[in-house]
Structure formats: C-alpha cells, structure tokens
Image (cartoon, rainbow, N blue to C red):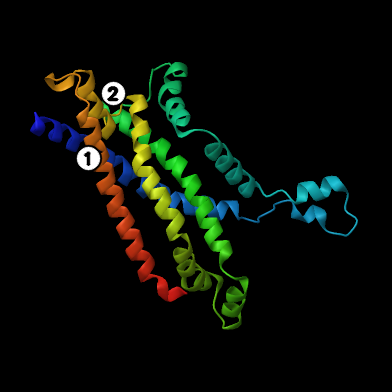
C-alpha cells in the first residue's frame, strides 16, 4: 500500500513540478516585457500639446500612451480576478463558442496546456510589478552618472540598473515562487492530475483503496520539502548578492 501511495504521489508531484517549471520559463521573461510596457512613455499624439495654451482635449489626447495603457489594463484585470476563475474561463468557455468544440487537446496534455497558459499570464503580471518596482527603485543619479561617463542607455541598464534590480527583487520574487508551488493545486479545478489530485484519489476510491486520509498529509511533506529547497536557494542567492549594498 505504501509503495502504491508513494508512487502515485510522486507521479502527481512530477506533474506539479512540470507546471511550475513551464510557468516560470514563460512568466519570468514575459513579466519583464510587461514591465517595460507599463513604463513606456511613447505618446503618438504628443504633438497636440505643444504650446502652453493647448485646449484640454488636446492635452488629454496628447498625453495618451497606448502601450502603457494596454499593459496596465491587462495587469489590472489579471491581478484583480482570481486565478481559478481565469483558469476556468480559459479552459471551458472557448468550447461553448467555437463550432469545432474545445480547442484544447484531449486528456492530461490539454489540461496541462490550458493550465500553463493561464499560470504564465497570471504570474507574468505579478512579476511585471515586481520588476517595475525594482527598476524604479534604482537611484536616477546612477543613470545620470553613467551618461556622464559616456555609457549608452543600453549599457546603463544592463551594467548598472539590472544588476541592482536583481538584488532588490529577490525577496518578493522568492515569495511568488513559493506561492506558485502551492497555487499549482488550483489546476485540479480542470481535472489536471497534480499532487493534491493524486492524494485525494485515495480518499475517493482510486487505485483500489478508499477512505484513506493519510496520503493527503503526505502531500504536505512534498510541498514542504520543495518550498524548503526554494527558501534555501533564495537565501543563498541573497547572500551572494550582498556585494551590491
């Protein structure tokens, strides 16, 4: 019995780990793109506000920054609604409106794909705000000093701003990583067979057993070990980055 439970839980944990890894691979770079978009100052109609006595409508139109507005609106929507709701809408709603039925492949692969896309979009929005805060927390004087030394804006970002930003965002990013480990359990709402699903299966009669509650407690051990490993890693990373102080 124990070997059966451990085998099922390990299989569920591997599914959890797969979703965790794919989410990070997509959300970490996409979050940086959204952060740059939310800080974008491009105003295509900025010429309308030239002159001290420009009418109010010209000032409003001239001040519009479309890339900034789109990114901030997306971040507002995603951060303001539950991840579970986003996952349900993404997985189930298209099937009601598309003539060919659900666009997702059948079985576990389709559920994994839908969950990965929902998690990537959700966490990229949270990561973008962390990135933005880290970039804007670097003193402007250091960027000005780089310009005085003849550095380009690109060199200043990668050699000055980015390195200091990494140090500042490690604590909040570590929290998001650990939260993501636990949030993967939400994917069971679309029947994705992750770790909690595997533990709950022994309670409802799968694998030839029913009424077993102790496998659910074992799922907590898996989560604790994995989050403990992440906590140790980020603590080590913070110590390695102490030279930026």
Choose mark 1 or mark 2, whichever is in front.
1
Give the image quarter of residue 242. bottom left
x and y percentages locating residue 149 in the rendered image: 57, 83
Numbered mark located on residue 106 in the image: 2
The residue lying toward the viewer, choosing from 242 and 216, is 216
Percent from the top left, x then y, of residue 125?
A: 50, 45
Which residue matches tag 1? Answer: 14
Q: Residue at x 41, y 39 (%)?
A: 119
Asked if the residues shown at circle 1 and circle 2 are in contact, with their CB atoms under 8 angstroms apart, the answer is no
Residue drawn at x 30%, y 29% is 192
Mark 1 crowd level (few <14, some 14–19, many ≥20, 10 Å Cα): some
Please state which of residues 245 and 145 is positioned toward the viewer in this rendering.
245
- Residue furthest out toward the bottom: 149
Q: Is residue 55 above or below residue 73?
A: below
Closer to the camera in the image, 241 or 214: 214
Q: Relative to residue 32, is residue 186 drawn left or right?
A: left
Residue 124, position as x, y percentages in the image:
46, 46
| Camera-side residue of 71 and 130 | 130
| Left or right for 24, reference 4 | right
Of helix, strand and loop, which one carries label 2?
loop
The first of marks 1 and 2 along the sequence is: 1
The picture quadrant where one finds residue 100 is top left
């Amino acid at each position: 019995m124990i070997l059966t439970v451990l085998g099922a839980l390990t299989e569920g944990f591997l599914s959890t780990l797969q979703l965790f890894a794919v989410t990070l691979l997509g959300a970490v770079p996409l979050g940086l793109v959204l952060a740059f978009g939310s800080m974008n100052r491009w105003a295509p109609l900025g010429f309308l506000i030239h002159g001290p006595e420009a009418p109010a409508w010209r000032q409003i139109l001239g001040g519009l920054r479309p890339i900034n507005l789109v990114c901030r609106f997306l971040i507002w929507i995603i951060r303001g609604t539950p991840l579970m709701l986003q996952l349900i809408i993404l997985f189930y709603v298209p099937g009601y409106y598309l003539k060919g039925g659900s666009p997702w492949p059948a079985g576990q692969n389709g559920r994994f794909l839908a969950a990965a896309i929902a998690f990537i979009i959700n966490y990229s929005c949270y990561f973008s705000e962390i990135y933005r805060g880290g970039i804007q927390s670097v003193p402007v004087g250091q960027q000005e000093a780089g310009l005085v030394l003849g550095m380009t804006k690109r060199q200043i970002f990668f050699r000055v701003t980015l390195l200091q930003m990494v140090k500042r965002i490690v604590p909040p990013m570590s929290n998001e990583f650990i939260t993501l480990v636990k949030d993967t359990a939400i994917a069971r709402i679309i029947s994705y067979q992750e770790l909690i699903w595997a533990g709950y299966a022994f309670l409802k009669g799968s694998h030839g057993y029913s009424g077993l509650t102790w496998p659910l407690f074992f799922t907590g051990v898996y989560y604790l070990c994995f989050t403990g490993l992440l906590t140790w890693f980020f603590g080590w990373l913070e110590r390695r980055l102490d030279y930026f102080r």
